[in-house]
Image: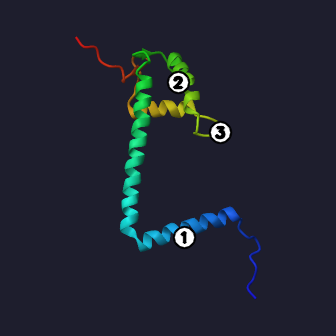
Amino acid sequence: MPRRNPKPIGRRLAAKFRELRKWRRAWDTKPDQMERARQKNVLAAHDYYRDLNDGLREYVLAWPATMTSPEFIKLMMDTVPLLGKGRTRKGYNWRSFRARLVRLGFCKFDPVTRKWTNTTVRPLAL
């Protein structure tokens, strides 16, 4: 008689393992089809995040060209509730939002003037 597992796994974990085995089998038996599906999903994700960043760029475009740190933080704090939907239960951290704006090149800090510069502002046509 086989020895019973002293700590059986739950139904959810068993379902996850079944799903993983299904995907592993699909990659082993139909690698070309799976690679095509992966590339299609990568393109779809690329389009999704490009649209997300374009929307954020349009939103940040309405901000002033230069801001002091308190003004910048207030604008970010006002924006954070808009970003919290669907992210996490706690919402969105304004520090990670600031890092995202800097990483995407929408804003940068000038240590000489101690001001934040909005780089998404359209240049003046002279």
Q: CA distance from mark 1 to mark 2?
A: 44 Å
Q: According to the image, label 2 marks what residue?
A: 76
Q: According to the image, label 1 marks what residue?
A: 21
Q: Earlier in the sequence, mark 1 or mark 3?
A: 1
The x, y position of residue 18, in whole percent, is 59, 68
Given residues 38 and 5, the one toward you in this image is 38
**Which quadrant holds residue 85?**
top right
Secondary structure of the residue carrying tag 2 is helix
Q: Earlier in the sequence, mark 1 or mark 2?
A: 1
Q: According to the image, label 3 marks what residue?
A: 89
Image quadrant holding the N terminus, namely bottom right
Q: How is the image coloured?
A: rainbow
Amino acid type, callout 3: Arg
Image quadrant holding the C terminus, namely top left
The x, y position of residue 53, in whole percent, is 42, 34
**Which-is-in-front pick, marks 1 and 2?**
1
Crowd band around label 2 with a 10 angstrom C-alpha radius: few (<14), some (14–19), many (20+): some
Q: CA distance from mark 1 to mark 3?
A: 31 Å
| Dot label at residue 58 | none
Given residues 82 and 115, the one toward you in this image is 82
Crowd band around label 3 with a 10 angstrom C-alpha radius: few (<14), some (14–19), many (20+): few
Point 50% across, 66% down: residue:
23
Horizontal placement of 103 versus 72: left or right?
A: left
The x, y position of residue 73, in whole percent, is 53, 21
**Which quadrant holds residue 116?**
top left
Vertical arrangement, residue 44 with respect to residue 3, above or below? above
